[in-house]
Each structure stands twice: as structure tokens, then as C-alpha cells.
Amino acid sequence: MDRKRMFNNTGLIRQKNSEWLANRATGSSGRVILIVEDSESDIFFLLRAFSQSSLTNPVFVVRNGAEAISWLSGNDSFRNRTQYPLPSIVFLDLSMPVVSGYDVLRWKQEQTFLPQILWVAVSNADTPEKINAAYHAGASAFLPKPLSAHDIEKLLRDHEDFWVRKKIEAASSVVLH
């Protein structure tokens, strides 16, 4: 893997995220994507797949399950929701040390404060047992690594009804006086 290319790609993502955050302050919005992945090479390939797809959403990366829980809880260095917004989509590596993706999925099931999020479990192990365990733990979707631009575009097309339901639920929760 070319580390310089990976750094440049990560730099481009940071630049786009900064632009998105500036636009958000003026009223623009977008579905935030959070990648939870401990492998630099897997982050590189996932970011490359995003850049090759039609996806223009802001993308943020945390390196382990504990950081993901802190981000989602708004704890520690992730308190500023303008800088660290709640994601609409989480791409979650299932096999991480200390706090695994399965642990994050089980944690999120106990949280009442989290909005509706599309949880995409990603793993090198795509056996029926691993896939079933991911869904049982609370994943919305499962994709085997490595991910391609086609995989991501298909996932978003297949889950478009998720966003329609989310918009309807948000509208129905508005109380008129």
C-alpha cells in the first residue's frame, strides 16, 4: 500500500469534512458516515471505495469500538456535536480488539438517546455464523471486506426505504401547537 496516497486521500476527506462542517453551520445538511475500523489498510480501501462511488457524504473515522462509543455518547473529546455529529450510517468492523464491533452493536441496543442509524457490519469473516451473529447483535446490513464502490452504492440503494422511513418518523414526531 502506498502510504503517501493513503495520507493524501485522508487529507482530502478531512478537507471535504471541513467544508461540510462550514456549510452545516449555515444550514446545509447531509448524512454523516462514521467508519469504525482499526486497520489502516481497510480504512484506505473503504475511503477509496467511497471516493469511487457517487457518495459525497461527510466521512469520519474512529479507530476502535471504545472511540465509537465515546463519539456516539458525546463523551470525552467528542462532546462538540457540531464538530462530531451523530452519524446516519456507521460502517463497523466486527473484529477489533478490546471493544469489538459486536460489543458496540450490543451497547447501542441499550441506548435510548441514539437516533435511527443504519449499522453496516463489515468483516473479513463472512461465514453464515458470523453474519447471523452480526444481525442478532443489531446490524442493519452486513458487507464482506474488501468493499467496492459498487457494494456501497448497492447498499445505499437497497436501504433507501430506511431514509424514507426516517424522514416520515421525524415528521410525525413534530408536535403542532
Image (tube, rainbow, N blue to C red):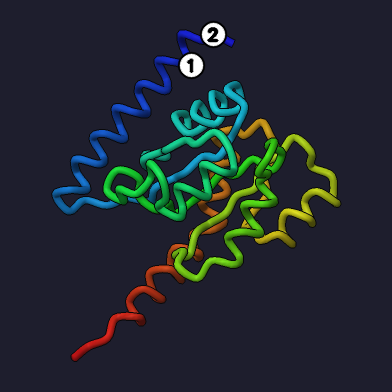
**Quadrant in the rendering for residue 149:** top right
Q: Which of the labelled discs sits on residue 91, or is there none?
A: none
Residue 167, compared with residue 78, is above or below; it is: below
Name the residue at 30% across, 31% down: 16
Q: Position of residue 1 (x, y in %)?
A: 59, 11
Label 1, on which residue?
A: 6
Name the residue at 66% across, 46% down: 101
Q: CA separation, marks 1 and 2?
A: 6 Å
Q: Position of residue 31 (x, y in %)?
A: 38, 51
Q: Position of residue 90 (x, y in %)?
A: 52, 48
- At label 1, the amino acid type is Met
Q: Residues within 10 Å of mark 1 (few under 14, many from 20)?
A: some
* Secondary structure state at the residue bearing disc 2: loop
Residue lying furthest bottom = 177
Of residues 30 and 101, the one nearer the viewer is 101
- At label 2, the amino acid type is Asp
